[in-house]
Amino acid sequence: MRRKHVIFFVVVMFLTWNMLMYVTLVTKSPNALQHHHGDVKVKLNDLQEQIVLQIQENEKILHDLQQKQKQPSNEVVSQAVPKIVKPNNTGGLENKLSYNKVKADNVILPILMIACNRADAIQRSLDLVLKYRPDAKRFPIIVSQDCGHEETANMIQKYVTEHDVIHIKQPDLGKVNVPWPQRKFEGYYKISRHYKFALNQVFHTYNHSAVIIVEDDLDISPDFFEYFAATFRVLMSDNSLWCVSAWNDNGKRGMVKNDPELLHRTDFFPGLGWMMERNMWLELGPKWPDAFWDDWMRHPDQRKDRSCIRPEISRTSTFGKKGVSKGLFFEKHLKFIQLNEKYVAFTQKDLSYLIKENYDPAFHKFIYDLPEVSLKEVATDNTKHLSEVRVTYRTKPDFKAIAKHLGIMDDFKAGVERTAYRGVVSITFKDQRVHVAPPVEWKKYDLTWT
Ligand code: UD1
Ligand code: MN
């Protein structure tokens, strides 16, 4: 017993020390620091990022434990879990048939817009959605509002009166009970709480069979609805897909191929304008996390090896400079994402090539038939005569170095790089298509790469 006490005491002291260090470092005025050391701010950001990740990890572990404890009483809920996540092995033909047979055109796809306290943002987003929406019956708009902000509520009400927008309100506006070290993340707790409410409304009150979720600070492309209408059919006919997203995490101007028709599969959940089926919510809703819902989605316990469809050129872009995660990421990255401008009539096209059984063999062959070159060769324009090349990475530092050089997002979530499919990240670098790929014998993502 005593030994246990000593160990407990030491652990508590250690944690307290870490917390004190964290608070002292993070709460220092960044301006004052900037004058003294240019890179201290960068280090602080890194530190902060690491702490966020650590906290998220802890959250997940805690959550998993709680889930395990709850399991016996959860039986009724788990009965609702649908879609068997087992791609059938019958080759392309059967899927193609089911893709052709699938009746997707009459399914109502509501737009769920998540709002809080930005009246001007909701106005801008709603105006654009109304401008591009081809059919009010097929794409009803539900604005779900958190935060109880009156000016925003009044703005939404205008659209209720003048258009056919539905306005629902997240009823629980109380503070979230967040333990002290996480209090600065309260915003993420509120967002998660709001998503849970809003999605329950969509599926359990309004009884829809799918949803397209957007946030109030997103612009959409002219073919946003066309994109989701067409890919919905793919989503319905492929069990290895769990979402369609409008977003390319590496979709900066100059880094994308000038081909608005180009679509991909990705193992990284992109969010930022995305669609899922009712089945998914029946699976995820009961275990929805208290915070950081998007990173939670990226965890293998949720993703279960499923992929999303994403475009080469984004169908959304964010103008939310001021948001819960502050402006830094916006200024450094988000504002450069290119929004597609050219309308593609996706529903007139056969998208069955995106179905796993059709896509994977072709993808694998394409990638590993490409000429393999070194990063140096790409960087020094030595391979300019080749329109597409492959650069190999074997380790996490390998990938980071390549990513840094080519301007690719270099972070991992649960071992997966942003936009990656089967470990491959493809971008355009100085007009050349570069596919950053693991060795051909690659089997699965390494969870320790974070
Ligand atoms: C970032 C993500 C966002 C994700 C969120 C949670 C980007 C560009 N954005 O939010 O997709 O959902 O992290 O991990 O990566 N909101 C509420 N209640 C609140 C505060 C905000 O409902 O108390 C709503 C906002 O209206 C908005 C959404 O939550 O629709 C995200 O909030 P925002 O302030 O834009 O935060 P981001 O940092 O962009
Ligand atoms: Mn935002």
Image (cartoon, rainbow, N blue to C red):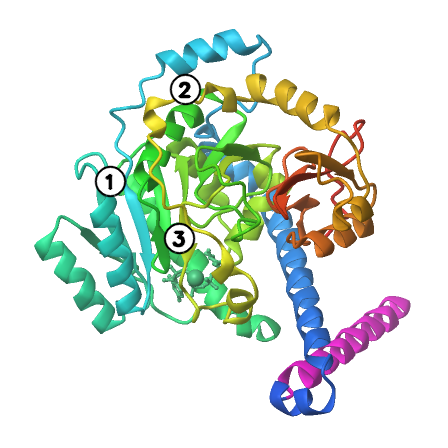
Mark 3 and mark 2 in contact? Answer it, CB < 8 Å: no
Q: For the residue carrying disc 1, how many other residues have a C-alpha within 10 Å: few (<14), some (14-19), or many (20+)?
A: few
Farthest-out residue, right: 3
* Residue 90 on the magenta span: no
Residue 16 located left or right of residue 227: right
Q: Where 272 falls versus 275 (above or below)?
A: below
Q: Circle 3 is placed at which residue position?
A: 195
Q: Position of residue 23 (x, y in %)?
A: 67, 82
Residue 87 at least partly seen:
no
**In which quarter of the view is residue 27 placed?**
bottom right
The amino acid at mark 3 is Tyr
Q: Position of residue 438 (x, y in %)?
A: 77, 36
Q: Circle 1 is placed at which residue position?
A: 206
Q: Main secondary structure of the magenta part?
A: helix
**In which quarter of the view is residue 119 placed?**
bottom left
Q: Circle 2 is placed at which residue position?
A: 350
Number of the front mark, 3 or 2: 2
Residue 19 located left or right of residue 291: right
Q: CA distance from mark 2 to mark 1?
A: 31 Å
Residue 43 located left or right of residue 298: right
Residue 370 at least partly seen:
yes
Q: Earlier in the sequence, mark 2 or mark 1?
A: 1
The mark found on residue 51 in the picture is: none
Q: Which residues are magenta?
A: 1-28
Farthest-out residue, left: 161
Residue 376 located left or right of residue 132: right
Q: Where 191 falls versus 301 (above or below)?
A: below
